[in-house]
Image: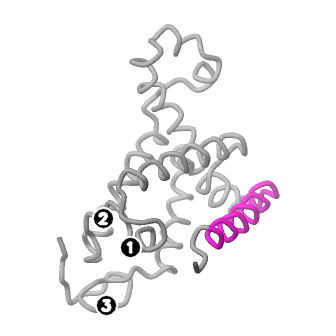
Amino acid sequence: MTIMTDVAVGGARKSGRIDWSPYLVGAGIGILSWVAFAGFGDPLGVTTAFSRIASLFAVPVIGSDAVAANSYWKSMPLKWDYGVWFLVGIPLGAFLSAVISGTWRLELVPEVWRERFGPSVFKRFVAAFLGGIVIMYGARLAGGCTSGHGISGGLQLALSSWLFLAVMFATGLMVSRIMFRKA
């Protein structure tokens, strides 16, 4: 599905698609952060909401009594607050952005992955799932994720958030260099 347009919404038009301006998107994230602080009294972040939603998926596996007795979920019980709705809105916003920019397509194995690791959908999904577990564990261990630390903490000039950002970028560069090195 591709939407062709003659209007460049916040960006330059190239080859029938819209490229979003990183400056306008960054300003939008900053404004969204202000709204979150002013309207809800909380910073942007998704890992807490993700953890709360995880309790729903844990009930069929370990039972509602075990979820209710779990000290982690006791400290952050499921509630449908702005954080959970923000988390739900992220994939919806990403989808709308891709449709509007004309870049949406269903892609189970990205080309850069296929070139390095082959076309296996199963292998790609297992790697993505394991990577998600590692990054979620790290985000909860750090007390925040890229949006919680990187955006909200960075805007508040929190030293721990700036340290988090430096380590996150350095780690990302090293891992991508290892994973996508030339054969």
Q: Which percent across, then down, holds residue 73?
A: 58, 22
Q: Residue at x 47, y 31 (%)?
A: 54
Horizontal side of residue 71 vs 108, given as left or right: right
Of labels 2 and 3, the one closer to you: 2
Identify the secondary structure beneath mark 1.
helix
* Residue range corresponding to the magenta coloring: 156-178
Crowd class of label 1 (few under 14; some 14 to 19; many from 20; radius 10 Å): few
Q: Which percent across, then down, holds residue 49?
A: 51, 38
Task: Answer with mark 2 or mark 3, whichever residue precedes in sequence.
Answer: 3
Horizontal side of residue 139 vs 5, given as left or right: right
Quarter of image, res 72: top right
Identify the secondary structure beneath mark 2.
loop
Q: Which mark is residue 13?
A: 3
Q: Residue at x 43, y 74 (%)?
A: 115
Mark 2 vs mark 3, CA separation in Å: 23 Å
Q: Which mark is residue 111?
A: 1
Is residue 61 within the magenta segment?
A: no
Crowd class of label 2 (few under 14; some 14 to 19; many from 20; radius 10 Å): few
Which image quarter is the C terminus in?
Answer: bottom right
